[in-house]
Image (cartoon, grey):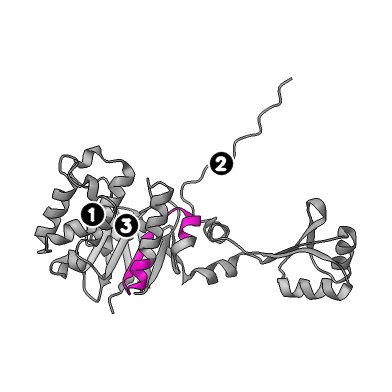
Amino acid sequence: MTSIDVQDLTKEYGSTRAVDQLTFSVLPGRVTGFLGPNGAGKSTTMRLVLGLDRPTSGTATIGGRAYAAIDEPLRHVGALLDAQAPHGSRTARNHLRALAASNRIPERRVDAVLEQVGLASVARRRVKTYSLGMRQRLGVAGALLGDPPVVLLDEPSNGLDPEGIIWMRELMRELAREGRTVLVSSHLMNETASFADHLVVLGRGRLLADTPMRGFIDARVQPRVRVRTTDGGALGGLFKDHGIEAVEGEEGRWTVLDARVEDIGRLTSASGMTVLELAAEEGTLEQAYLDLTATETEFAATPSPTQPQEA
């Protein structure tokens, strides 16, 4: 099993502890979302996993080995950390050819991954002429070049258009279905919710959560039910009589807090009310994430003061 295993990992830069005794594993067959506020230590952790920096203490291994001990590492681990890394004067194809040669990867893989990421038609253009989204695709091509069982991607949707975002989402899912280990760092909560099966969340260098995504949301966001009947006033009275906390909205629509659809459905049915609308309001990853990290954000804007009204 090729997993990423982080054990008691710590990294200090002078008096700053960027990573603080992290322990977690990223397992094959699922996409693990790697979340945290700016400065939480996500990029530092990924660099430590990839041997680009040395830990102060602890270990980060891939398949039981440190990255530096892996021969021809592109065959084992693919990574996209910086889409601006390729030399601008090289063509995309030559950039990948150089990577392939350094790891004894057959040149036919170069054309295969260029096709896979949608860059085959512009493969002989210089990288400096590429848009950010095209550079992201090239970075993904480099990560996939050695057909590795482990893939790490840092903000892979950055700069992509809507079609590209959908493509990236499906690519990550497909990699996981193939049994690969996929770790994806992102600040886009809604996008992460669309592809991640599992979450690892950091705050100020510490581990805040290591859990399946659905469980993460359900544990932190109160379930609610939206309901509307032909008589909003009577519905409000029904809730009051049963000690149910609910908030009235527009057009006689009520939102019931900490409730489930089946319970509210049975209650309104027993009362003989005609129900026009009954739906669960599921919590979102963004709500759960903000609830967890509210006190862990290193850089936060303060609300603007109320502007005086004009005379």
* Image coords of residue 229 (percent x, y): 83, 62
User: At label 1, which amino acid type do we have?
Assistant: Leu
Looking at the rendered structure, the secondary structure element under dot 1 is helix
Q: Residue at x 90, y 62 (%)?
A: 234
The answer to whether residue 96 is seen in the rendering is yes
264 or 183: nearer the viewer: 264
Q: Residue 128 falls in which quadrant of the image? A: top left
Which residue is labeled 3 in the image? 44
CA gap, disc 3 and disc 2: 27 Å
Secondary structure beneath dot 2 equals: loop
Residue extent of the magenta highlight: 174-192
User: For residue 114, which numbered disc appears in the image?
Assistant: 1
User: Closer to us: mark 2 or mark 1?
Assistant: 1
- How many other residues sit within 10 Å of disc 1, few (<14), some (14-19) or many (≥20)? many
Residue at the limit of the structure toward the bottom, as seen here:
1
Residue at coordinates 15% horizontally, 70% vertically from top-left?
69
Dot 3 surroundings within 10 Å: few (below 14), some, or many (20 or more)? some
Q: Which residue is mark 2?
A: 302
